[in-house]
Amino acid sequence: MSKGKIKKIELSAKSVEEFLKIALDVRKHWGFDDEDVGGPWYRGHQRKHWSLIPNIVREGYFDRKTEDEIREEFAVRAPALSRLETLPDNDWDFYFLMQHYGAPTRLLDWTASPAIALYFAVRDNLGYYDSAVWMLDPYELNRRVARKDEIISPSAVGTNLKDTKRVAPWLPQRWSKKPIPEYPIAIFPTHIARRISSQKSCFTIHGKRESGFARFAKGADSCLVKVIVPARFVHDIRLELLNYGIDDTTIFPDLEGLGRALVTSYRNLKEDSPHRDVYVRLRPSRLHKSGVGVFAIRNIPQGKRIFADENEEVFWAEKGSIPKSGAIRKLYDDFAIIRDDHYGCPVSFNRLTPAWFMNESKTPNTRCDENYDFYAKRPISIGEELTVDYETFSDYPEKPKQRKKAA
């Protein structure tokens, strides 16, 4: 099979149709014919900057000893927990099963279906980030790494013994001292679970180099291509795929998949906008000179929850962990919720939302409940500054101790 060259390894798609055209063009560039049974593999990433690394690397367990311990524990405990009548009786199928249930492995999931990969890329992206779909020529990868441009299923009945031996170094027996190869190869899994079939699953298995794919995503003869889905088109592409009948039941053909599909379907029907339920904005305060205050930009009814979509978590820092003075301490004193010896603040002060800028009044127009949600105590008019009584939900900061003057 002759291989063409690709001028760019990073492309962009704004619709399902455009993505599928790119996938077809790349397929032709790599020399795949319409009659070929095999073809490129695809992997969807919710965020475009995510690297092609397996979960064992992301979890920080990327060493042989730890991996063998994980494999050992899974093999020991799985029989009592398995819903299957029988468990696999070989190392490869056990490894596929580990990946299927989310255990750390050196496997990366791919699919032979471009549409399924695109769905994985956009299904959980709310449009805040660019997504991406990676395309891989698995035959070229294996030609370069394993010296043979074919893909085998190492645990399937009837697999050629020579082929099995060729891929065996990538999964040595537990506690073996044999080294694993440097770079990843492509393999077919045995269909030990229904989802593997429905997702048209394929796998690559990493070698000992964490960034094993980096060398194959360079130059004109790359066997990897990355297709970016810009954030502003993620929602529309997700709806297009649903119109084509691709949802969670396609890739998770069970009741759990049905439940997910219903959530996704009705979430997509919801019309949203950044200004929905927004009642305030920041302006120079009338209560504190040179300070900032929170002002109503709509009439706020009595009892209305004012920051309805704010989901900023509160991080509780111990008093002893923060500076005793200076600009950083003042940041805590000015914004944090103080309870005994703890300061409640945003996970990062770079994520301060308008609620953290509320100024104090002993005759406030808002109240704070036990969950630190703010409600209008009375009708609040456009242009009015919102206030709250700090004492109802927070202690006051300690005043710095004054040094005594020398006699």
Image (cartoon, rainbow, N blue to C red):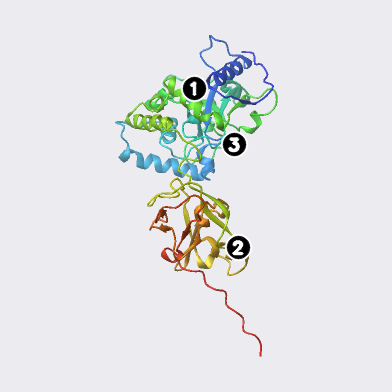
Q: Are marks 3 and 2 in contact (CB under 8 Å)?
A: no
Mark 2 or mark 1, which has the lower sequence index?
A: 1
Binning the other alpha carbons within 10 Å of mark 1 as few (below 14), some (14 to 19) or many (20 upward) gives: some
Amino acid bearing label 3: His
- Residue 184 lies, in percent from the top left, at 57, 31
- Residue 80 lies, in percent from the top left, at 30, 40
Residue farthest along the bottom direction in this orientation: 407
Amino acid bearing label 2: Lys
- Residue 118 lies, in percent from the top left, at 51, 26
Query: What number is the disc on residue 289?
Result: 2
Disc 3 target residue: 49
Q: Taking the image as drawn, is residue 199 in sight?
A: yes
Kindly state the secondary structure of the residue where label 3 is placed: loop
Q: Are marks 2 and 1 in contact (CB under 8 Å)?
A: no
- Residue 61 lies, in percent from the top left, at 52, 45
Kindly state the secondary structure of the residue where label 2 is placed: loop
Mark 3 or mark 2, which has the lower sequence index?
A: 3
Question: Vertically, is 175 above or below 162?
Answer: below
Asked whether 5 or 359 is in front, the reply is 359
